[in-house]
Image (cartoon, rainbow, N blue to C red):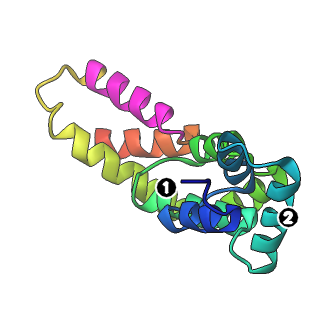
Amino acid sequence: MGKRPILAYALYLLGRRGRTERELRDKLAEKKYSDDDIALTIERLREMKLIDDAVFASNYARDKIAIYRRGRFRIGLDLLRKGVARDQIDQALGEVEEADELSAAQSLAESRLKNWQALDPLKRRARLTSLLQRRGFSARVVRAVLEADKAS
């Protein structure tokens, strides 16, 4: 049994989840398709509007904040690793409302603080700060969440 036609394989990959152009190029190259075939396929997918890094970045940023409770810095780094251009990342992150990011951070904090109630307040604050920083939230968002925790 031979290799699947390149366009069919690319469509299969895109049907499983959204991908950046670089991710798709890398996957096709792994299957030993020629560089010329890959370039033609990518161009065809662009024409079909099935691959667009700007749209991918925008959707990715919105999903990561709303569903996975990640901050802008982490999302930007993830998109950079996926091969999205810096200007497209900036545009996608610019669409993210600060209120949505703060809401995601507060939701994450509430879910973890339930388990940390018995901890010393300083230790709890350190854990919360570390968690929010790892998730990529800005210092301003981290401070706002810590202030809200202190008030409660």
The secondary structure that dominates the magenta segment is helix
Instruction: Count the labels in the image.
Output: 2
Which of the image's four quarters has the C terminus?
top left
126 drawn magenta: yes
In this rendering, position of residue 32 left or right of residue 59: right
Which sits in the foreground, 71 or 4?
4
Q: Which of label 1 and label 2 is nearer to you?
A: 2
Q: Nearer the viewer, residue 3 or 28?
A: 3
User: Front-most of 4 and 57?
Assistant: 4
**Which residue is depicted at the point 62% across and 58% down?**
19
**Residue 96 can be seen, yes or no:** no
Q: Is residue 12 above or below residue 117?
A: below
Res. 31 in view: yes
Kind of residue sitting beneath label 2: Leu
Image coordinates of residue 112 in percent, x first then y, are: 24, 39
Q: Furthest-front residue in view? A: 1
Magenta highlight range: 123-136
The dot on residue 40 is: 2
> Is disc 2 placed on a helix, strand or loop?
helix
Query: Measuring 60% from the left and 48% from the top, which residue is drawn there?
Result: 72
User: For this view, does 9 lie left or right of residue 25?
Assistant: left
Circle 1 is placed at which residue position?
64
Q: Residues within 10 Å of mark 1 (few under 14, many from 20)?
A: some
Mark 1 touches mark 2? (CB < 8 Å):
no
Which picture quadrant has residue 41? bottom right
Residue in the foreground of this view, choosing between 103 and 37 = 37
Q: Residue at x 67, y 49 (%)?
A: 23
Residue found at x 74% / y 49%:
33
Instruction: Give the percent coordinates (x, y) of residue 9.
Output: 61, 61
Q: Give SS at disc 1.
A: helix
Quarter of the image where one finds residue 93: bottom right
